[in-house]
Structure formats: structure tokens, C-alpha cells
Amino acid sequence: MRKIFVTGIGTDVGKTVVSAILTEALEADYWKPIQAGDLDNSDSLKIERFISNNKTVIHLEGVKLNSPMSPHAAAEIDSLEIQLSDFVLPETANHLVVEGAGGLMVPLNDKDLIIDLIQRLDIEVVLVSQNYLGSINHTILSIDALKNRGIKVLGIIFNGDENQETEKYILGYSGLKCLGRIKQHQEINKEVVLSYKSQFEKL
């Protein structure tokens, strides 16, 4: 069974949309290790709204924080200290999609980052990239960081408006596979998520 960590080249590049699509396509379980802020509209609740299948189990978040900011800062406000040992993959016989928070270098505490969490969980990564000025730099930096840690990268999913030259350069430089593309949608709902099932169900 496949275990996938969905991370992005930054914040707001479409990790939750990609996580919903992969969860639906694989009829996988879903887990968000850290939810910082938006507890009434958390990523777990969004996934629940976006998927159609009856097989997915949405596991309880590892850590819930009240403030929408970097986990280390949000944890300090809540008088908590996040430790890597706090996080254990949920037990399941199903595929599992794990959604990160922000990018790879988001701090969890004074010494550990999201990339350290990925390394501890020891699962493969899907990197979400979005085309904007500077995205080549951000994407290649993310790829190099993952490779330097010996973390297996399953491939890249490009989210939003297509830029063929940018994508060609990133894929050529990195040698990674393009797993698929997500179009820009005005609204994300079950129908949109389900429309990508055939593209990703053989991931």
C-alpha cells in the first residue's frame, strides 16, 4: 500500500486540492499531522467535503493549533512544544495520503522542520509546484533539499495555469516525473476532484 506525503514549494500552492484528488483517486486514507489555525474549516474537513468514495478514513490530526501561522510560533502561543516523536503514521491497511503544512523548511520547533518530519515518517513525497515568477527557483530548491536528505520523490504535480517552458526546465533539471497537472478552477468541489480520478488512480 502506498504512503504519500504531499508537500509544496511554498504556502497556498494547492496541497489540499492535490491531497483531495490523490485521496479520491486512490480511495486512500488521509492524515494531516499538523493543523495550524482554521480549526472550524480545517484541511481534514475540506477533504471530507471534496471526496465522494466511501472507503477513505480521515484520521485525527496529530497536532491542532489555534493560530494560522508557522507551527513553531502557533505552538508557543498554545503553550505547546512540538516534538518529532509526537508523530506516528496512523495504522491502516489502505493507501495513505499525508498532507504537510507550508513548504519543506517550515519550522516545527527550534530545531526541526517539516522536512525532518518527512524523514522521520519515512514515506515518499509528491511535490506540488505552481507556476509564478520565482517558482523554478523554489521548486528546484525543494527538490535539492529532498534529494540531499535521501527522501524518495515520487514526482511533481503542477497546479494552476500551465507554463510549458517552466515545467520543461524543472523536469529536465531534476529528472523527476510529472505525475499530472491540475487546472485552475474557480471552485473546488466533489465533481472537480472526481474528474481527476482517472489521471491519478494508477499513481
Image: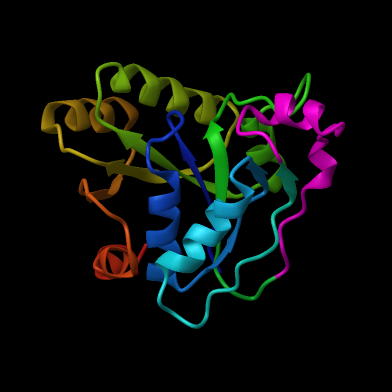
**Left or right of residue 158, residue 60 in this image:** right
Query: Residue 83: percent from the left, percent from the top?
Result: 83, 36
Name the magenta segment's main secondary structure: loop
- Please state the total of marks drawn on the protein image: 0
Residue at position x 62%, y 32% from top?
A: 115
Location of residue 112 in the rendering, given as x and y in whole percent from the top left corner: 74, 26
Q: Residue lying farthest front?
A: 40
Left or right of 56 in this view: 187:
left
Looking at the rendering, in which quadrant would you find the N terminus?
A: bottom right
Pick the front one: 37 or 51? 37
From the top left corner, tell me how far across and down residue 75 is, in percent. Answer: 77, 32
Asked where in the image residue 159 lies, by quadrant, the reply is: top left
Residue drawn at (31%, 22%) of the image: 135
Question: Could you tell me which residue is drawn at 25 percent across and 50 percent down?
Answer: 182
Quadrant in which residue 127 is drawn = top left
Queried whether the magenta region covers residue 135, the answer comes back as: no
Could you tell me which quadrant the C terminus lies in? bottom left
Residue span colored magenta: 66-91
Q: Position of residue 195 (x, y in %)?
A: 24, 68
- Quick check: 60 above or below 6? below
